[in-house]
Structures are given as structure tokens and as C-alpha cells.
Amino acid sequence: MPPRDHQFRVSSRGELLPFLLTLPLGLSRKAAKDLLRFRAVTVTRVTTVRHDTQLEPGDVVTIASGKQIPAESIERHGLKIIYLDDDIVVVEKRAGLLSMGSEGEKERTAHRILNEHLKALTNSPIQQAFIVHRLDRETSGLMMFARSRAIQSVLQENWKTVTKKYLAIVEGVPANAEGTLRDNLIESKSLKMHLVERGGEVAITHYRVVRKGRRNSLVELTLETGRKHQIRVQMAALGHPIVGDSKYGATTGLAHRLALHSSELKFRHPVSGTPMNFHSPMPTRLIEPVA
């Protein structure tokens, strides 16, 4: 069953914002304003809801338990919240931002930024975001987080059923317009991934050329497995490294970044079972040179 919305009946005349602060949800003033800004609050008989909306006895105030947030409504330190409910969060990460903490960076990460924002939103010090998967620091686009360890476990156990698509600008034009790359990968002591004849971990990527240019191409890639640097090393081995990926042999660059973007996540909601599909377009400045 999908999570139920919270409904409260008004007993006396007054304004909406003060009413929200009296509810047994423990909302802070900022959290209540965020709910209003995200259009997560509705009132019977009222078309447009504001903080100063006048409530009358008998009105019913509804707070959505899960709300699609307009993409432009939150953007904090290179992280944009695309979808938020009681169980999951889908965000859009900019290139250059770590997914989670490392020895060299523990503060400015997608995980930390999101977790602190959710704590403030719910006025609670309890952990709010749990890592489900990662994107390379240099990769932009969609990521999903869980709101509890139980949901994290469910998502990770069923991660193979999630459709994960990427867009990349690669050097040159692949000879075949589409195909499947199947390789064995192993990590060296220098933390670089390599193809090997035997051993390692199997990596499977399906690719499709979307647009051809004179010097490079726009390629859509669908992951069947999720190995470290999988797309990067496999496209390089094909002879078409991702633009900006000097680590794996690229000699050209665009916008001083890796031209790789997580463009689609498609899955069933871990609680309600509702089909969910999120898309994120590749930055225009990366696509424009493909002509």
C-alpha cells in the first residue's frame, strides 16, 4: 500500500501556517514553509494555498506523504531534489560533487548535503538518507537514496531490476550503431580499472548511438551490471573513450568535465509497487558540439 496522506480537521478559525505548527508532526517553521512551497499542503474549498490562508471550522488540511517536487524548487550546493517521499529520494547531482564521503572529503558530498537538508526539513537529528548506489565524482545526473536502512536493503537487493541509462559524448563514431559490451574488469593497485581475459568481475553494457558528429558522438548506454568505471573503461576499450576522460585515454574535452550523465532511473516503488520513471537531460553545453 502507498503511504497515506496526513489529514487534520480544523476546529477554530485561524491562519494556515500557525495551524501547521500546532500539528503532532513536530514541524519547525522552516519545514512548514517548505511544505507549502513544495505544494504538499491542500485545504478543502481553497484553490490556492498560502501561508496566510484563512481556515474555517470544519476545513480539512491534507499534507501529502510523498510529493513530486518541481525541479527548480530546491538546489543546494550542486544537488537538486527531483522527488521526495517517506521512503526514497531522487536527486540530480552536478559533476564534481562526490556521491559519498572519502578520506579526502567528508563534508561536501551529495550524501551529506542531502542528509543535512532532510534533517532540517523534518526537524529531526535522526539519519535521513542512506546510500543506494554511487556516481563517479566526474559524472552528473540522477541518483537515488533510501530514507531508512530497511528500504536501502530492499532497493539494493533488487538493484538489477532498476533500469539505469546514461548519456555520453564519446570520441569518434562507433562502427556499429548499437551493440552489447561484455568484458571482465579488474582494479589495479593504482585504482584504475582494466580489461582481463579471465577472472575479475563481468561487466555488461548495452549501447546505442543517438547522434553522430564529425569528431564525436552522443551515445545512450544501459547498464546490466554496475562495476566501477564500467562505461568509461568499456567505451575506451571499444576505441571511443568518453570526452574529457583523460584517465582512460581521451584526448579531447568539453566544458572541463567528463561528458557522462546519468539520464534515467526506472523502477517500482519499494513500498507501493508503483512504476516510477525519472529522466534528466544531458547538459546542453555538452550536446551542442555534436554536429
Image (cartoon, rainbow, N blue to C red):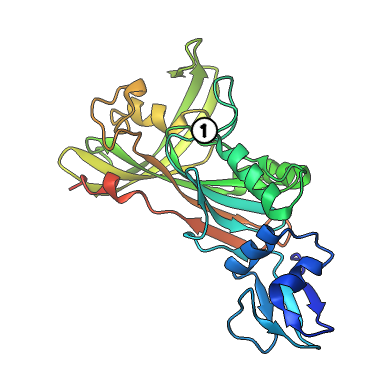
Task: Give the residue displayed 58% in from the left and 58% down from the top.
Answer: 83
Choose top left, top right, bottom left or bottom right for residue 104.
top right
Choose top left, top right, bottom left or bottom right for residue 242.
top left
Residues 52 and 258: in front is 52
Q: Amino acid at mark 1?
A: Leu
Residue 41 against residue 280 in the figure, above or below: below
Residues 50 and 128: in front is 50
Residue furthest to the left: 214
Residue 274 against residue 199 in the figure, above or below: below
Q: Is residue 240 left or right of residue 46?
A: left
Residues 138 and 266: in front is 138
Task: Give the residue displayed 59% in from the left and 19% down from the top.
Answer: 103
Give the x, y percent position of residue 127: 74, 42
Q: Is residue 210 left or right of residue 99?
A: left
Kind of element beneath mark 1: loop
Q: Quadrant of the N terminus?
A: bottom right
Residue 269 appears in the figure: yes
Give the x, y percent position of residue 265: 53, 51
Choose top left, top right, bottom left or bottom right for residue 66.
bottom right
Give the x, y percent position of residue 82: 53, 56
Residues 29 and 258: in front is 29
Give the x, y percent position of residue 247: 36, 21
Residue 270 appears in the figure: no
To which residue does mark 1 refer? 98
